[in-house]
Amino acid sequence: MKIISRGKGKSAVSAAAYRSGQKLTNEYDGLTHDYTRKGGVVHTEILLPEHAPHEYTDRSTLWNAVEKVEKAKNSQLAREIEISLPNELPLSENIELARRFVQETFVSKGMCADICIHDPDKEQQNIHAHIMLTIRPFNENGTWGDKQRKEYILDAAGNKIYDKKKRTYKCRTVQTTDWNDKTKAEEWRATWADFLNAVLAEKGFADRVDHRSFERQGKLEQPTIHMGVSATQMERKGIRTEKGDINRRIREQNAELHRLQAELEKVNVAIAELQKRPQEENLVSILMRFYGNGEKFAEARGLKLGNLKKAAKLRDVSQAIAFLNGHNIRTMSELSEKHAALEAEYSELKGKIIARQKRMKALSELLTNYEHYKPNKAAYDEWQSISNPKKKEKYYAAHSSEIEVFKAARSLYDKKLSGAKITPKSWRAELAEHESTDSADMLRLHKLEDDTALMATILYNVEHLQNYEDRQRYNHRDINNALE
């Protein structure tokens, strides 16, 4: 979600032209914006609320009307919401899904909505919709209403309060709609999640979406970073990018962390079950007996040792015995202690990896922003150095894109760096250092996986041997009872 504001050098007409892939002229400044060569636009339409003039179904008419009614140089012109559509649905159903969501969530509340659906590369499956929304409500006669109004502050007796310093009556600004309320962003995200989940469930898909961030969902892992147009195009051509490499690393690490956590939980359950049996027999002896009774066990259960659930590199019982001896583990209690140590190491390692992912994402964002900051700084500095108003205005008209891109890049640095210096060289060095440390920690993570897989193998063998021996004892007892 974002606001398209004239104060940030943006234009509602320009934004609408780009998203729809059309050629539109902005009557406010006389500039023509031609994006007819833009590909990937698969559907556009405008939905109007009650009281809106019918001629606003024309894109140029609608957004030029918005530009005309907003007089201030820093006016907010439109709100844009971008939604990802489900790749599982055909285009026609995605169009209908977006239309229903927009109609029920925004248009029914009084907003005009300009919907543009993009599917830039079907191989990438990145279908999404840009929704531009008007900010002013409509009066019943079809004219634009006010965004806000002034309201006098009254005393206990209902009288207006005079401010002697300002020499006027005290008043406050009251919004005419709740569209700018801080709770709306959360409400709209949740509504879209509900729309998506309903249609996915209706179509029989198991996947579900959650509008909350990973952190709010209680997940420690980081989401992947936003690729951007340039990096995405390079990756599509088979050219590896820094952002792409970071995303691949994050996905691989998150998958491995999830996989290991699931295995640790399974081992924990298995240990708890086996500890219910009142015995402290030496585990090595149990495994040796399992190995010795392998043929009988296989005959009874229709299994072979090689078919048991073991790690790819740790298939033999002898390696499980070596693990026990190497860690001086004799009993189930000691095995449980080793498992607790593995869990603690996993927790510590996961915290380090997640913190590093977060920092690497931040560094990548700073470096990407520098690509917008450095090449456009000269144009901005030149513009700032011009004292003649007419010359300055003329220079801005010719270099507005560079100036506004620089201002946006500088604004991000102001927000992220809090006054610290812009140091791309040190950021790159830090990123390389994190990548090196990442490799070392991933080796530790692989070792944890191997140890956990070995423990799972040991527990599997112990459980199945004990079950086999219990059945043998029961069978022997039944035979003796029958003979008696």
Image (cartoon, rainbow, N blue to C red):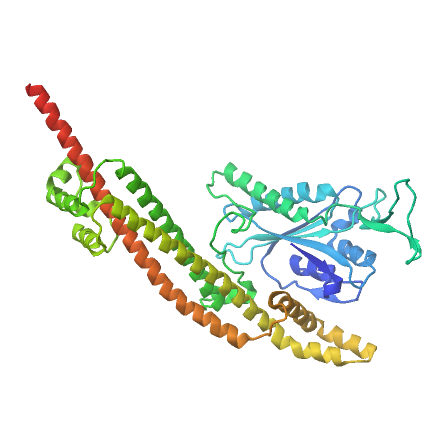
Q: How many marks?
A: 0
The one nearer the camera, 268 or 124, is 268
Q: Which quarter of the rendering shows the N terminus?
A: bottom right
Q: Furthest-left residue in view?
A: 483
The one nearer the camera, 262 or 121, is 262
Does residue 288 appear left or right of residue 203 in this picture? left
What residue appears at the point 52 percent right and 77 percent down from the top-left corner? 425
The one nearer the camera, 135 or 335, is 335
Does residue 337 appear left or right of residue 303 in this picture? right
Asked whether residue 21 is in view, the answer is: no
**How far across and how far down the image is residue 372, in percent?**
61, 71
- The image quadrant that residue 484 belongs to is top left
Q: Is residue 362 above or below residue 459?
A: below
**How far across and how far down the image is residue 41, in percent?**
61, 56
What residue appears at the point 80 percent right and 64 percent down from the top-left corner? 73
Asked whether residue 279 is in view, the answer is: yes
The one nearer the camera, 354 or 302, is 354
**How far across and how far down the image is residue 332, in percent?**
24, 44
What residue appears at the point 75 percent right and 74 percent down from the top-left corner? 396
Q: Is residue 119 above or below residue 108?
A: below
**How far across and how far down the image is residue 109, in percent?**
73, 42
- The image quadrant that residue 366 belongs to is bottom right
